[in-house]
Image: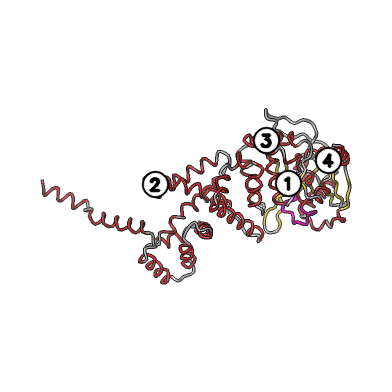
């Protein structure tokens, strides 16, 4: 007890000024746009620092992806200095300052120092508006974790550390600033951030920060679905997606966010499929390759769709309409917690809808499927299923070869598939039945003439 008390006393908050060069951080490691924002704000007489995750990542020897700036200037004052900037947000107003570098637009987020005055909250204690401004020390108190309360002045090349953030990084621990229970009530999304940062950075969540999470996970049900989707995307695109998903489950955060996770991870085949999909995503991110959000959600939800689909077929429904109904049913259930944007939802459903079409290797169907805009994503999904023994590897091999063959060889492949009975028997039978019906059906003119003669 005494040791714990002494530890808290020694860790009392207070500004510590550390020269960044002691930790190998140099001005030329920082984004040029963030440096320009700080320089212009300071030239106008305001305080301005590069803050949070960028400094944390540099101290850990990682390359930051985002560079945020905190300043004493209000959003309107920032907007006045940067003509092309725009103010966004209601609950939490920030300024987006665009820079056109590296072949495209990049955004520097600029926030005004938050004040210590009480912000309006709802019945659960969640802050609904947070536009009370204050000093840099007050802003540091309002940040979530100690490792994010680090401010770098690019001109003096000094780091301001208000809550022992550098010490916690050295101890490889994630510590909440203030009372964790109160902070989780103010913004339940902080629990998701704890899971993501812990998995992404390899930081252990400190006991006082970790212990209340499971008990307060239900607070996430009060968060708008669109915001939950944004946080889910950060988890999946963190570069440590599989570790993030496992941490979510360990902390009990998956139940209000993604309740299907228990079912997915409890079965070896589905767990293997999900792990492979997320590890492939991590690999693509590491290689700086594009990642499809539609593909990610297609992988996360496929087994639920397939289960629903097979139940409908067993109940006597026609195969293709049954799949469409299954897709819509699962999507509607998930969207109650995660508001998947239409562009991602459409891509996800196209990938699903094309899976049974890979089995139909008769006539012109393979050529038509190959011409579909979403073919590559659907093919990658087929490969993933084959790797996890959820579909015959021969099918994936056939389509791999089909893509690189000449037209004559493709036709030979189709004929061989039909002869072997692997070209999609149900599809072939359907074609034969339609042809038989068309032969039996008489033209309208013939029917009319026969009726006249009978009369």
Question: Which residue is the site of mark 2?
Answer: 314
Distance Cα–Cα, label 4 vs label 2? 64 Å
Question: Which residue is the site of mark 1?
Answer: 109
Task: Give residue 78's position: percent from left, percent from top.
Answer: 77, 43
Q: Earlier in the sequence, mark 2 or mark 3?
A: 3
Task: Report helix, strand or loop for mark 1.
Answer: strand
The residue depicted at 76 percent of the width and 55 percent of the height is: 31
What residue range appears in magenta?
A: 57-67
Task: Give residue 2's position: percent from left, percent from top.
Answer: 87, 37
Question: Which residue is the site of mark 3?
Answer: 216
* Closer to viewer: mark 4 or mark 3: 3
Q: Earlier in the sequence, mark 4 or mark 2?
A: 4
Give the quarter of the figure containing the N terminus: top right
Instruction: Please rate how many residues cluster around mark 3, counting C-alpha atoms within 10 Å: few if below 14, some from 14 to 19, many from 20.
Output: some
Distance Cα–Cα, label 2 vs label 1? 53 Å
Q: Earlier in the sequence, mark 2 or mark 1?
A: 1
Q: Quadrant of residue 262?
A: top right
Q: Which mark is residue 136?
A: 4
* Closer to viewer: mark 1 or mark 4: 4
Left or right? Give the position of 229 relative to 134: left
Distance Cα–Cα, label 1 vs label 4? 17 Å
* Closer to viewer: mark 4 or mark 2: 2
């Amino acid at each position: 007890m005494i040791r714990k008390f002494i530890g808290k006393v020694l860790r009392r908050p207070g500004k510590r000024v550390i020269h960044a060069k002691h930790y190998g951080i140099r001005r030329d490691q920082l984004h040029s746009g963030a440096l320009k924002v700080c320089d212009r704000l300071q030239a106008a007489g305001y305080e301005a620092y590069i803050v949070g995750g960028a400094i944390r990542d540099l101290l850990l020897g990682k390359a930051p992806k985002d560079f945020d700036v905190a300043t004493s200037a209000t959003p309107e004052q920032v907007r006045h200095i940067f003509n092309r900037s725009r103010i966004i947000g209601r609950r939490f107003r920030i300024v987006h300052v665009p820079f056109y570098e590296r072949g495209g637009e990049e955004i520097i987020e600029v926030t005004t120092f938050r004040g210590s005055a009480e912000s309006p909250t709802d019945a659960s204690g969640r802050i609904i508006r947070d536009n009370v401004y204050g000093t840099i020390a007050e802003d540091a108190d309002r940040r979530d974790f100690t490792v994010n309360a680090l401010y770098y002045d690019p001109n003096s090349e000094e780091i301001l550390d208000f809550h022992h953030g550098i010490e916690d990084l050295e101890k490889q621990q994630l510590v909440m600033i203030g009372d964790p229970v109160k902070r989780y009530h103010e913004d339940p999304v902080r629990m998701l951030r704890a899971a993501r940062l812990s998995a992404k950075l390899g930081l252990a969540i400190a006991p006082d920060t970790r212990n209340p999470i499971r008990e307060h996970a239900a607070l996430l049900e009060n968060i708008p679905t669109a915001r939950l989707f944004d946080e889910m995307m950060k988890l999946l695109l963190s570069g440590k997606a599989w570790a993030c998903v496992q941490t979510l489950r360990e902390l009990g955060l998956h139940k209000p966010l993604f309740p299907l996770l228990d079912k997915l991870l409890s079965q070896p085949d589905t767990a293997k499929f999900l792990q492979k999909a997320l590890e492939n995503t991590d690999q693509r991110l590491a290689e700086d390759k594009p990642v499809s959000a539609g593909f990610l959600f297609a992988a996360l939800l496929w087994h639920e769709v397939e289960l629903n689909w097979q139940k409908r077929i067993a109940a006597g429904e026609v195969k293709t309409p049954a799949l469409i109904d299954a897709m819509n049913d699962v999507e509607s259930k998930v969207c109650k917690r995660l508001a998947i944007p239409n562009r991602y939802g459409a891509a996800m459903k196209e990938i699903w809808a094309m899976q049974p079409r890979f089995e139909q290797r008769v006539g012109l169907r393979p050529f038509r499927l190959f011409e579909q805009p979403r073919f590559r994503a659907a093919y990658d999904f087929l490969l993933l299923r084959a790797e996890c023994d959820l579909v015959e590897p021969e099918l994936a091999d056939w389509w791999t070869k089909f893509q690189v063959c000449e037209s004559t060889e493709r036709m030979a492949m189709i004929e061989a598939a039909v002869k072997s009975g692997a070209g999609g028997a149900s599809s072939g039978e359907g074609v034969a039945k339609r042809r038989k019906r068309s032969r039996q059906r008489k033209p309208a003119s013939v029917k009319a003439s026969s009726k006249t003669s009978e009369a």
